[in-house]
Image (tube, rainbow, N blue to C red):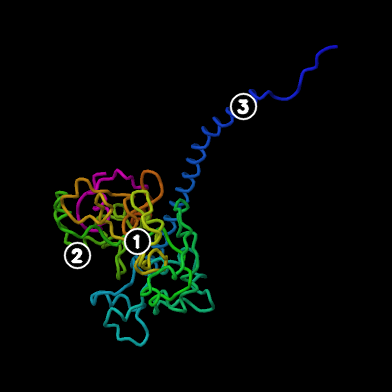
Amino acid sequence: MPHKNRGGFTLIELLVVIAIIAILIGLLLPAVQKVREAAARMKCQNNLKNLGLACHNLEGVRGALPPSSVQTPAASDMAGLREFQKSGTTGTAPADYAKHCFLSIILPYIEQGNVLNKGGGAYDLKQDWFAAINRPASGTRIPTFECPSAPFEHNFSTSSLSAADQATYGAGWNLPTSDYMAVNRSNNRAVIWTAMGLTDPGVSSDAIKGALASNQFTRLLSITDGLSNTIMLAEAAARPQEWRFGKMINQFAGAPNAYMNGAWAHSGNDIAIDGSNSAGSTLTLAADVPTACRINCANQGEVYSFHSGGANVSMGDGSVRFMSESVSLKNLLLMSARADGNPISE
C-alpha cells in the first residue's frame, strides 16, 4: 500500500514559523511606533499652529496680541485691562481684576466660541475663570489644547488640591488641562546673562518679556527682535503631574499639598523660560550656566514635551518649529525675550 503523507506541521516547523513571526514583529514594531509618534508630533504642531493663528486673528481685531494671563496686574497695566475689571470695584487695586488665561480669551478664534456659552450663561471676563458662571466653560475639554503624546488623561478633580486651594477654586469639580502655555518672559536674573557673555537687557524691563506678556496686550511693534525670532507659545506638557528628565516625580505638582496647576483656564499657566540646573530646578546661578539643561528638563515652568529629541514651539509670527534639545542656552533665552537686541546664531 502506498504511504500517505501526513498533513500539518511538525513541532520543529511550527516553532520555526513562530520564531520568524516574532522576528518580523520585533522588526516592525519600532517602525510602527515611529509612525505613531510622527503622527502625534504632527497633530501637536497643528494644534500649536491653530493657537498661534488665533492669537494673530485676535490681534487683527484688537490691534494687539492677548495677555498671556490676567492676574494681579500692576498699576501701570490696569488701564489696558478694563474689560477684566470686576463689577462694583474702582479698578485701582490688583484684586479688582478678574483672573484669566489667554486660552479662554482666544476661544472664539479657534471656533470654540460656543464653549463660552455653556451652561446657559455667557462666559464673564469680569469674573474669575473659576466663578460659578464660568465653570461650565472652564470645565470643558478642548482637544486643540492637548498633545496626543502626553501620558496624561488631561483631566483632574479639584478634590486633589490642598484645602486652601479647594477653598479658593471650589471642591469636587473636574478641570481639563492644556499642554500648551504662553511664554511670558526669558530668564530675569542678570548673573545668567552676564555668564553667557551678554549685556543684561534689564530684568524688569519690557525687553525681557515674551511675545505674550502677563497683564498686557502686546502690539507687534513692541517685538523688536522680530516675530520669527521670538517664541510665543510652547509645550509644557502633562501638568499637573510633575516631570523631570523623562520621569514623573509627583502625580500632582506640589504633592502632597497639591496646588492648582495645568487647568487650561487657569490664570497661572504661563511659563518663563529660565533654563534648568542639573536637578531640574530653575537656573539661578552663574556657575550652572555651562551645564544648564534647556529643553525637556522640567515641565513646571519650562519647555517640556514627550517627543523624542525636543519640543514644539510657536513663534511670534505664528510659525511652528521643533526646538531641539541641543539648542544652546544662549539662543533659547534670546528667543524667549522680545527686545533684548541680540542676534540669534542658530
Horizontally, is 274 left or right of 156 in the view?
left
Amino acid type at circle 3 is: Leu
Indicate whether residue 296 is drawn in magenta. Answer: no
Foreground pick, 170 / 82: 170
**Residue found 51% across the figure and 74% down from its top:** 117
The residue sitting at 43% across, 76% down in the picture is: 170
Q: Which residues are magenta?
A: 322-346
- Give the camera-side residue of 262 and 216: 262
User: How far is disc 2 from disc 3 in space, using C-alphas?
Assistant: 71 Å
Please give the label number shown on residue 182: 1
From the viewer's perspective, is 88 left or right of 205?
right
| Nearest to the observer: residue 42 or residue 271 | 271
Mark 2 vs mark 1, foreground winner is: 1
Q: Residues within 10 Å of mark 3 (few under 14, many from 20)?
A: few
Question: Which is more N-terminal, label 1 or label 2?
Answer: 1
Residue at position x 49%, y 37% in the image:
30
- Coordinates of residue 233 in the picture (x, y in percent): 35, 58
For residue 5, what is the image quadrant? top right
Q: Quadrant of residue 237?
A: bottom left
